[in-house]
Each structure stands twice: as structure tokens, then as C-alpha cells.
Image: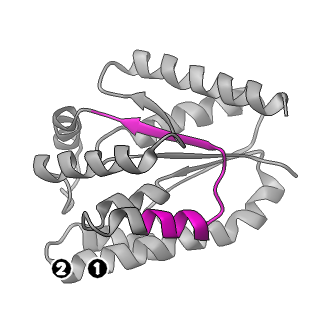
């Protein structure tokens, strides 16, 4: 069965999960069964990655990266089974994890994973002003992760926008939730219309 597969990505605090849940609600209202997974996931590999992200230092950064990659690969492995049950699949975080690599490795890492992993045509980058992202992160009732400071958010956002090029649809999520919802629905309508015309 052909599925609608969507990737939602962006920097920490950009509102990826909020946007993904807007999509999920829309397609469930249309009658789809929707599978949504955010990386790092709640599976064992994702939990190890998330725990490492709450620490500091090069070793924990490496551990977080390795287990993040393994978690994403596990989601890709599960896609075959997921396709049998769901009409819409949404991954929160996928290729843009490469933007968290050092500056000189990020483009190579992105290209490597882009060529290695299956890639849907529905790619949404949730952009945000780093200061707004930091404010939203501070409002969460959660531990700060190693990349969740203004300096890192600025650097990673720059890399994410560079890596996205023309392959990604981009929305600005710095404003109100209602403004973002309108932008998301516009993108979904475009994607759905485009896929019907193929």
C-alpha cells in the first residue's frame, strides 16, 4: 500500500512535534490511521540517545549521535511493517541530525545519509528565530540538552538552512500557533494536490 510519508525537522525548540501533531490531527480527521514517531524515540535506542544529550562532553556527544542514528535506522527498518497498517507516517527528526555534527562534517554527513536512507518527497523544515526557540525551551518542564543554548541554536540553524537547500518546504514557526497552522495546512494542501496529479 502506498503511504503518505512526511519528515518534520528543525532545530531544538522549533516546534517540530507541535507541527507534526497538527498534521496527525488533520489526516486522522480525514480518516487515516497515522503513525507518528519523534527521534530520539521512546524505544531503548532513543532513550539512550536522549539520556546522553542531557550530559556534557565529547564522549556523551558521540554516544548521543551513535544511538540517535541507530534509533532512526530502526524506524526505517520498521517502515515495511508500518506501511501495512497506516496510511500516513510522520517522522519528527531524520536527516537534519547531521546539522549537529561539527561544521566541516555536517554537509558530508547529510549527503551520506541522504544517499543511504530512503527519503520521501514530503520534507518540512520548521524554522524559528533561535531566541524564540530558546525561550520556548526554557518554558518546557524538562532538562536542558547539550545543544540547547543560544550559541548552539544559532550555529545549528545556519547549518540546517544550508543543508535544506531547495529540497525542503520551509515554514517560519516564530509567530503564533494559528499562523503556523495556516502555513502547515497550505503545505499539506500543496503536497496532497501534487500527489493526486501524479
Residue 4 spot, x, y in % from top left? 73, 43
Left or right: 79, with 1 as reference point: left
Q: Work out whether residue 79 can be spotted.
A: yes
Badge number at residue 62: 1
* Up/down of 5 relative to 54, above or below: above
Foreground pick, 79 / 154: 154
Number of residue marks:
2
* Up/down of 112 relative to 13, above or below: below
Left or right: 17, with 82 as reference point: left
Left or right: 85, with 185 as reference point: right
**Image quadrant of residue 180?**
top left
Foreground pick, 7 / 144: 7
Where is the C terminus found, in terms of image quarters?
top right
Residue 165 spot, x, y in % from top left? 45, 43
* Up/down of 25 relative to 120, above or below: above
Residue under the image location 50 percent in, 16 percent down? 182
Residue under the image location 30 percent in, 33 percent down? 128
Q: Work out whether residue 44 can be spotted.
A: no
Residue under the image location 20 percent in, 58 percent down? 147
Residue at the far bottom: name it: 59
> Over which residues does the magenta segment extend?
109-128
- Crowding around mark 2 (Cα neighbors within 10 Å: few <14, some 14 to 19, many 20+) is few
Badge number at residue 45: none
Q: Are marks 1 and 2 in contact (CB under 8 Å)?
A: yes
Residue 37 spot, x, y in % from top left? 55, 55
Q: Under tag 1, what secondary structure?
A: helix
**Image quadrant of residue 81?**
bottom right
Residue for badge 2: 58
Amino acid at each position: 500500500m502506498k503511504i503518505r510519508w512526511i519528515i518534520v525537522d528543525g532545530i531544538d525548540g522549533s516546534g517540530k512535534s507541535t507541527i507534526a501533531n497538527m498534521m496527525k490531527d488533520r489526516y486522522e480527521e480525514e480518516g487515516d490511521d497515522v503513525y507518528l514517531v519523534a527521534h530520539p524515540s521512546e524505544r531503548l535506542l532513543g532513550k539512550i540517545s536522549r539520556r546522553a544529550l542531557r550530559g556534557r562532553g565529547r564522549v556523551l556527544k558521540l554516544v548521543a549521535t551513535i544511538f540517535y542514528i541507530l534509533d532512526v535506522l530502526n524506524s526505517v527498518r520498521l517502515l515495511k511493517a508500518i506501511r501495512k497498517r497506516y496510511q500516513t507516517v510522520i517522522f519528527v527528526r531524520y536527516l537534519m541530525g547531521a546539522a549537529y555534527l561539527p561544521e566541516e562534517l555536517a554537509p558530508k554527513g547529510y549527503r551520506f545519509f541522504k544517499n543511504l536512507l530512503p527519503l520521501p518527497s514530503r520534507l518540512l523544515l520548521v524554522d524559528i528565530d533561535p531566541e524564540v526557540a530558546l525561550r520556548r525551551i526554557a518554558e518546557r518542564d524538562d532538562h536542558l540538552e547539550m545543544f540547547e543554548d543560544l550559541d548552539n541554536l544559532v550555529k545549528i540553524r545556519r547549518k540546517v538552512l544550508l543543508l535544506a537547500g531547495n529540497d525542503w518546504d520551509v515554514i517560519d514557526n516564530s509567530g503564533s500557533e494559528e499562523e503556523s497552522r495556516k502555513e502547515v495546512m497550505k503545505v499539506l494542501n500543496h503536497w496532497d494536490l501534487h500527489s493526486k496529479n501524479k
